[in-house]
């Protein structure tokens, strides 16, 4: 009986101590509804898109939009690392990290990261998604032809035409003299924009095909070209006969090169060239391209003269004597 009373008293004491501890120290007794730490919801890269931003003569800014998909419980400390790797060399060009913060809603969230890279070649864009400094997903996308992204001062809706019916450069012979030929040059331009194109000029440069010597150079004002219209710009040039020429035309706006085109003028009946034809060597007379401002050195004629030389040594008589002596020595040696 005393033993049972003792056990009962001990059990009551344990219960009392537990109740006192629960009242004094919070959290000693576990909450039966508590499921433990909340596991963050999953996040991954839903997609990556690249747009061209601001461009200068040397660099261009790529706007990389990363869409992050989130589901379930809130996810803290989400961040995105974006890297641009040179497609040709494989070297890391630039990198940038963006802190996204906590994602609590289900669905996609879009973030934008700007990377400034040299305006040349192509790049592989790598996007790495982190959650609590742990990599959870990644994506990769490539962009090529970055040099085609032009800064504002190089953008123009006007360019040389590109068709067989309306070639960008053409010419006609206006006057064929004994030593020089005058050409009427024509460049054809098209404004494909919605606004008139102004402050345009065309530079015509005629280069002798084989030597690349500039035979003529002239600049003509192109005036104003209305929206959607095609106009021609005319000029004239006088060049030496019997040569072939490349006609290089340059479209300028306020001193900035907007577009270029090339044509060919064959004035040598024995040889012809085209824009895509390989050059060949021909006889070139530099004096044909003189401007008359100075004298060109001419070749000097010299009278032909005969010269004779003799190698150091003995004459033919001494050679014969030496031969006989050798025969004599050989006979004595044989005896």
Image: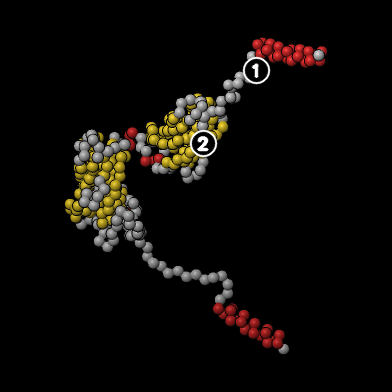
- Comparing 243 with 40, the one in front is 40
Local crowd size for mark 2, using a 10 Å CA cut-off: few (<14), some (14–19), many (≥20): some
Q: Secondary structure at mark 2?
A: strand
Nearer the observer, 44 or 105: 105
- Residue furthest to the left in view is 174
Please provide percent x and percent y for residue 330: 67, 84
Compared to residue 65, the image places residue 283 above or below, namely below
Is residue 316 visible in the rendered image? The answer is yes
Asked if the residue under mark 2 is in contact with the one under mark 1, i.e. CB atoms within 8 Å, the reply is: no
Q: Is residue 265 left or right of residue 316?
A: left
The picture places residue 157, in percent across and down from the top left corner, at 27, 38
Residue named by callout 2: 137
Question: Which image quarter is the C terminus in?
Answer: bottom right
Residue that label 1 marks: 29
Q: How is the image coloured?
A: secondary structure
Locate residue 213 relative to residue 108 in the image: left or right: left
Picture layout, residue 250 above or below residue 44: below
**Which residue is drawn at the image coordinates 74% and 15% (left, top)?**
11
Q: Which mark sits nearer the N-terminus, 1 or 2?
A: 1
314 sits left or right of 69 in the view = right
Report whether residue 289 is seen: no
In which quadrant will I find the N terminus? top right
146 lies left or right of 318: left
How far apart marks 1 and 2 lie (CA) works out to 40 Å
């Amino acid at each position: 009986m005393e033993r049972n009373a003792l056990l009962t008293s001990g059990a009551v004491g344990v219960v009392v101590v537990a109740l006192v501890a629960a009242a004094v120290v919070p959290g000693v007794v576990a909450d039966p509804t508590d499921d433990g730490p909340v596991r963050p919801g999953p996040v991954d890269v839903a997609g990556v898109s690249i747009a061209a931003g601001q461009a200068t003569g040397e660099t261009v800014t790529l706007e990389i939009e990363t869409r992050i998909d989130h589901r379930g419980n809130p996810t803290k400390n989400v961040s995105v690392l974006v890297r641009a790797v040179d497609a040709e060399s494989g070297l890391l060009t630039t990198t940038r990290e963006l802190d996204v913060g906590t994602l609590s809603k289900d669905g996609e969230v879009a973030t934008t990261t700007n990377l400034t890279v040299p305006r040349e070649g192509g790049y592989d864009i790598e996007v790495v998604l982190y959650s609590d400094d742990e990599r959870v997903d990644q994506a990769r996308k490539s962009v090529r032809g970055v040099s085609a992204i032009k800064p504002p001062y190089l953008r123009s809706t006007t360019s040389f035409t590109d068709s067989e019916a309306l070639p960008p450069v053409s010419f006609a012979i206006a006057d064929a003299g004994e030593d020089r030929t005058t050409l009427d040059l024509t460049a054809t331009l098209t404004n494909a924009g919605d606004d008139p194109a102004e402050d345009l000029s065309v530079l015509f440069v005629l280069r002798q095909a084989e030597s690349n010597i500039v035979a003529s150079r002239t600049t003509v004002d192109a005036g104003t070209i209305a929206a959607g219209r095609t106009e021609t710009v005319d000029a004239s040039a006088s060049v030496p006969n019997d040569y072939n020429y490349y006609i290089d035309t340059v479209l300028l706006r306020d001193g900035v090169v907007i577009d270029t085109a090339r044509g060919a003028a064959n004035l040598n009946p024995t040889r012809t060239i085209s824009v895509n034809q390989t050059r060949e060597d021909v006889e070139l007379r530099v004096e044909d391209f003189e401007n008359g401002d100075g004298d060109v050195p001419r070749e000097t004629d010299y009278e032909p003269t005969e010269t004779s030389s003799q190698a150091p040594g003995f004459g033919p008589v001494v050679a014969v004597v030496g031969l006989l002596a050798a025969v004599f020595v050989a006979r004595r040696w044989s005896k």
